[in-house]
Image (tube, rainbow, N blue to C red):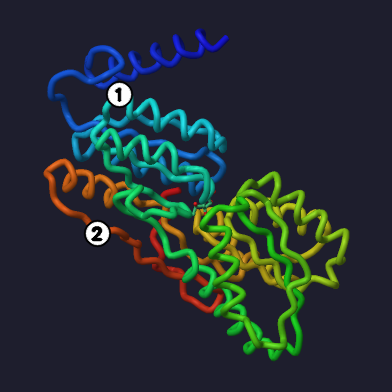
Amino acid sequence: MKRNRWICGVLWLALCALALGGCQGAERTGKSAVVVGFSQLGSESGWRIGNTASMEQAAKAHGFGLMLENANQKQEKQIAAIRSFISYRVDVIAFSPIVETGWTNVLNEARDAGIPVILTDRMIDAEDDDLYTAYIGADFLAEGLRAGEYLIRKADDMGAEHLNIVEITGTEDSTPMRDRQVGFLQAIAGDGRFTILESISGDFLRSKGEECMRYLLEKYGAEGIDVVYSHNVAMTLGALDVLEAAGVRPGQDIILISVDGEQAAVDALREGRINCIVECTPDLGETVMTMVEALVKGEEIPKEIQPEETVFTEFDDLTGLAPRGY
Ligand code: GZL
C-alpha cells in the first residue's frame, strides 16, 4: 500500500513538473523560473476560493510557477504537500495553516533544506519564530474588536438594556477563530448589557453554520437570542437560511454580525438581513508574490505584513462600494 502511495507521489510531482514547463524528475535541475509551492487548506468558503484565485493570479502576474495543493481541510495533507515541495526544491513555500499547532517537524525540514516559508492568511503557534520567514495575513484580533465595537454602537443606538448573544465560531485552534473571539470579548468586556449565552464551532462551513443556528434556535428560541456573531460569511449564510425558515427576520428580530465580506454578505447587508460585516480580505496574493520576488533576490522582508481592512455596517452609505469579486 505504502509503495503505491510513494509511486503516486512521484507521479504527481512529475506531472507538476511537466505542468511547470518540463522540469525533469521529482527534483528541479538547472535554473528554471521561480517556483512557489502553495499549500491551500481547502475550499470551505467563498473567502477561501477568492484567496486561492488571488494567489494564482499574482503568481501568473509575476511569471512564477505555482505548485498549488489543496488539502481539503486536512492538516496531514498540508504536511505532505510541504514535504513534496521540499523534495521538488521549490524556491519558496507558502501555506495557510488550517490550525496553529503541529507544524514544527515539517517546518524544521523546510529550514534544513534552506527553503523560506511564508505563512499566508493564518498563523502558527511556533515556539521558534525562525521556523517561518514571514506572516502575511489579517489582524484577527482587530477584526473581533471591530465586531464588538459595532455591537456597542448598535446597543447605544437601540437604547438596549440587555442583549443575549450566541457565537458561531470558525475552525477550532485556528488563528481567525481564536482571535476573532478574543477581540470580540475584549471589546464588550465590562459592559453589563451583554451576555454570551453560548459559543459553538461551525468550522467556517455553511452546512455547519446551519446546524449551529438550528441547535441554538431550538435551545434558546428566537425570543431568547438578540445577537448572532458569526466568524465568517459562509456560516452566516447558513444561519440566515435557518432563521428565515423559522419566520425570524434576520437584521431586525435578531442582529447579525459577520466577518469576511463576500458579495453575498454585502447584498444581504444592503437588504437589511445582516447588520454588520467586518472585512477580512482574501486578496493576499500580490503581497505574497512581491515578498517571494524579494526573497529570491536575497533581500530581507518584514516578519509580518497585515492588510488594511475595514467594517461595513447598517449605519454606512454603501452605494459607492465596489463589487467584492468573491
Ligand atoms: C480568515 C480565513 C478564514 C475566513 C473563512 O483569514 O482564514 O477561513 O474568514 C475561511 O471564510 O474559511
**Mark identifier at residue 239:** none
Residue at x 63%, y 82% (from the top left corner): 189
Residue at x 62%, y 65% (from the top left corner): 274
Q: How many labels, in total?
A: 2
- Establish if 193 lies above or below 39: below
**Mark identifier at residue 302:** 2
Q: Position of residue 109 (x, y in %)?
A: 36, 35
Horizontal placement of 256 versus 2: left or right?
A: right
- Establish if 296 lies above or below 177: above
Tag 2: amino acid: Pro
Neighbourhood count class around disc 2 (C-alpha, 10 Å): few under 14, some 14–19, many 20 upward: few
Tag 1: amino acid: Tyr
Of helix, strand and loop, which one carries label 1? helix
Q: Position of residue 322 (x, y in %)?
A: 39, 60
Q: Is mark 2 within 8 Å of ligand 1?
A: no
Quadrant (top left/top right/bottom left/bottom right) for the N terminus: top right
Horizontal placement of 56 versus 194: left or right?
A: left
The image quarter containing residue 129 is: bottom left
Neighbourhood count class around disc 1 (C-alpha, 10 Å): few under 14, some 14–19, many 20 upward: many
- Establish if 75 lies above or below 142: above
Q: Position of residue 257 (x, y in %)?
A: 61, 67
Whole-Å distance between the Cαs marked 2 and 1? 26 Å
Of helix, strand and loop, which one carries label 2? loop
Horizontal placement of 100 versus 296: left or right?
A: right
| Disc with the residue nearer the chain's start (2 vs 1) | 1
Q: Nearer the viewer, residue 166 or 292?
A: 292
Q: Position of residue 277 (x, y in %)?
A: 54, 66
**Mark identifier at residue 88:** 1
Residue at x 31%, y 53% (from the top left corner): 134
Residue at x 41%, y 60% (from the top left corner): 138
